[in-house]
């Protein structure tokens, strides 16, 4: 799943891939609302166009439009920076004006850094993503040139402004980072963004937990652990609470019983390590290997 | 608000600054839950450390820890890539091991790309951020090396795994992007951070948990538990996962250490029950009574 690396911009496998989802599920949203179009307005560097494409594809956006890219199009710097998101670059469409780029879109959003003297609703990426999923029709999201951002005339085309709430003492998002945050929020509304199913096994049946606690208790009695006698029941309750808290699975309870058996038997069996495996059995620690 | 630009990584003013936030509101959370620590485990390139610092500071995170950075520390490549986030780099602390880096943290999260054969809860960045705001105590979030991600042994230290639900056909987040998504989600909870729940005691600092695991490990080695040798590391990892899962408090960890000490010493001391209390001490089981 992890792409080829390029220069210093090596991908890290953190975080992750949801292998169980098919591509068709991903790219075609379950709702009738199409994915938003990402519009880079007068982008300066091909490398940043490539990085934006990579950011988009990570979260399932594939439609990129370029308005008057400074260095023309195609741009040989874009491909390497896209790190494999070639499909996005190959399908990118070029326009002369912002108006032409969004002519088929029903909702235009402008990402901006500061007030522009235009009175428009301002949304977070999260709120904008919800609106994009909820509103029928195609949305376009405008991103300005790297250095200067969108012009007032570009913003005037939009109905809504998107801003990311950011550290007022240090606001320094680059183009690809702005794109990735918006794409990430949009992806949450897709099927892929459901919270991952936890693969946690069920806690063991109470009887199995009780068996483990009884095994430990026997050992602790033999070790004269419960002292003074007046505190025995309190201590037992404390231990039960502590051992109930984990919600250990049946497998984990068996593992712990193997540990206890080993500790219980170690004096007698230290000279016969070859038999050690018997305490756990083949299944005892047979967790999936990494 | 926008920083000086560096090379191709020019910041764009989209999206933006929330001018209405004061710095104190932003950087110092209104809740008693401290901001999470970002831990880069064996990072390869100084440039990526700088980019991660920049990503952090955008969303108000300032505490960076580095575990065995490949090219040493400080690294002259980091500063320029940080684009002004110098305060994060200057305060970065370097550790030899992951265990040392998270020893004072009560909640350890590991960002991973794929299943690791360890059974732990998996959270999205959003869910993890909510948990970090809700749970008292300091959280650490581990990010692996750029190329390979976290090792299984690193993941074993964590109680929870963070994954970003991502395009299964194209998973290509780089280190700084992974950091920025996690930091961004955390920053959302700042304004409306809820009072943390206080019913549960804090999990013990990781260092105390490690002490307990080491104590058990010594006993199991003495008991020849780890057999056959080829499976030793797998078994150790299984036990660590199992013992990390409960989130035992410092008190509970002490209780378990008392239990282990009793089991360890019982053969020798069975004839001297009157001394048993010493293994735990008066405070050892002094938990609030049910």
Image: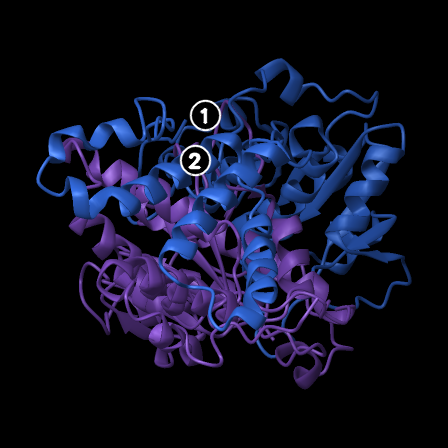
Chain colours: A blue, B purple
Does the residue at mark 2 contact the one at mark 1 (Cβ under 8 Å)? yes
How far separated are the C-alphas under marks 2 and 1?
7 Å
Residue appearing at x 37%, y 31% in the figure: A3
The answer, for residue B182, to whether it is visible in the render is yes
Residue B192: x, y in percent?
A: 79, 68
State the SS at label 2: helix
Q: Quadrant of the N terminus of chain A?
A: top left
Q: Residues within 10 Å of mark 1 (few under 14, many from 20)?
A: some
Q: Residues within 10 Å of mark 2 (few under 14, many from 20)?
A: many
Residue positioned most to the front: B271
Residue B3: x, y in percent?
A: 51, 72
Q: Quadrant of the C terminus of chain A?
A: top left
Q: Is residue A173 left or right of residue A253?
A: right
Q: Are marks 2 and 1 on the same chain?
A: yes
Q: Which mark is residue A82?
A: 2
The answer, for residue B214, to whether it is visible in the render is no
Residue appearing at x 83%, y 48% in the figure: A158
Q: Which mark is residue A86?
A: 1
Above or below for B95 versus B158: below
Q: Which mark is residue A282?
A: none
Residue A148: x, y in percent?
A: 60, 62
Write down the chain letter for disc 1. Answer: A
Q: Is residue A218 left or right of residue B97?
A: right
Residue A48: x, y in percent?
A: 47, 46
Residue positioned most to the left: A271
Q: Quadrant of residue B269?
A: bottom left
In this view of the protein, which residue sits in the foreground, A176 or B34? B34
Residue appearing at x 25%, y 53% in the figure: B217
Write down the chain letter for disc 2. Answer: A
Above or below for B236 versus A241: above
């Amino acid at each position: 799943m992890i792409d080829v690396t390029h220069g210093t911009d090596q991908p890290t496998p953190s975080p992750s891939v949801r292998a169980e989802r098919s591509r068709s599920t991903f790219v075609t949203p379950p709702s009738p609302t199409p994915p938003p179009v990402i519009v880079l307005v007068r982008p300066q560097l091909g490398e940043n166009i490539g990085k934006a494409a990579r950011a988009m594809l990570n979260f399932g956006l594939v439609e990129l439009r370029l308005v008057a890219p400074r260095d023309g199009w195609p741009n040989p710097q874009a491909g390497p920076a896209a790190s494999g998101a070639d499909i996005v670059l190959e399908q990118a469409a070029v326009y002369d004006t912002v108006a032409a780029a969004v002519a088929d879109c029903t909702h235009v959003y402008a990402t901006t850094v500061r007030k522009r003297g235009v009175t428009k609703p301002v949304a977070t990426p999260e709120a904008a993503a919800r609106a994009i999923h909820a509103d029928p029709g195609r949305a376009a999201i405008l991103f300005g040139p790297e250095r200067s951002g969108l012009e007032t005339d570009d913003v005037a085309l939009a109905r809504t402004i998107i801003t990311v709430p950011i550290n007022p003492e240090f606001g320094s998002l680059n183009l690809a980072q702005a794109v990735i945050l918006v794409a990430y929020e949009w992806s949450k509304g897709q099927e892929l963004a459901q919270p991952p199913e936890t693969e946690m096994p069920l806690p063991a049946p109470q009887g199995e937990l009780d068996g483990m606690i009884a095994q430990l208790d026997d050992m602790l009695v033999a070790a004269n652990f419960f002292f003074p006698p007046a505190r025995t029941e309190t201590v037992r309750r404390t231990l039960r609470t502590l051992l109930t808290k984990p919600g250990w699975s049946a497998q984990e309870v068996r593992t712990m019983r193997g540990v206890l058996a080993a500790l219980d038997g170690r004096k007698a069996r230290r000279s016969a390590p070859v038999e050690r495996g018997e305490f756990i059995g083949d299944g005892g620690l047979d967790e999936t290997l990494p």
